[in-house]
Image (cartoon, rainbow, N blue to C red):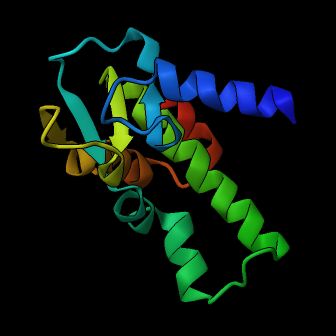
Amino acid sequence: MFHKLLLITFLLLSSPKGIEASKVRHGNLANFKEGQTVYVIQSQKVYAEMEPYKTITKESLKKGSARYNILIRRCTSLYKAALGKSEYSLIVEIDGVDKTLHKTEDVTKTIISLLTPAERRNKNYESLLYTF
């Protein structure tokens, strides 16, 4: 219990003011410098554009079912691969940044554009991790 409290305290003290550490989707807060642009993303919009997620909604798959879990893992792998290939230093969920303290730029459409051409070229989603 004490270790968890110590970890939470450390994270709160080490995080730059106005950025929630739990909302960071890519990058490292330790490397963030004040005045640097914080790139924000709406993850739900990115997931909604992925073929595996469209299959989940089309088939009305229930959370926790085997097929749902397989497809959502594919989505997460694609999402992480796209974020990694984007070359942005710090990407945070849109509601995880105080926009009055930091300069922000929305990169949701850019990340979606990284996914779409690869999905059209190849329907084997595992191999998409290597085609960006």
Answer with the quarter of the image where residue 69 lies: bottom right
Question: Residue 40, relative to residue 4: is it above or below?
Answer: below
Estimate the x, y position of residue 47 in percent, counting from the top left: 45, 61
| Position of residue 106 in the picture relative to residue 14 (left or right) | left
| Position of residue 127 in the picture relative to residue 42 (left or right) | right
Q: Quadrant of the C terminus?
A: top left
39 or 12: nearer the eye? 12
Residue positioned most to the right: 1
Q: Is residue 132 visible?
A: no
Q: Residue at x 49, y 75 (%)?
A: 54
Estimate the x, y position of residue 44 in percent, counting from the top left: 41, 64
Q: Quadrant of the N terminus?
A: top right
| Position of residue 28 in the picture relative to residue 69 (left or right) | left
114 or 94: nearer the eye? 94
Answer with the quarter of the image where residue 33 lies: top left
Q: Residue at x 78, y 33 (%)?
A: 4
Q: Residue at x 45, y 12 (%)?
A: 30
Estimate the x, y position of residue 117 in percent, counting from the top left: 32, 47
| Position of residue 44 in the picture relative to residue 70 (left or right) | left
Q: Is residue 90 visible?
A: yes
Question: Residue 57, relative to residue 104: is it above or below?
Answer: below
Q: Residue at x 73, y 77 (%)?
A: 63
Question: Residue 72, relative to residue 79: is it above or below?
Answer: below
Estimate the x, y position of residue 58 in percent, counting from the top left: 54, 87
Q: How many marks?
A: 0
Question: Residue 34, relative to residue 11: is it above or below?
Answer: above
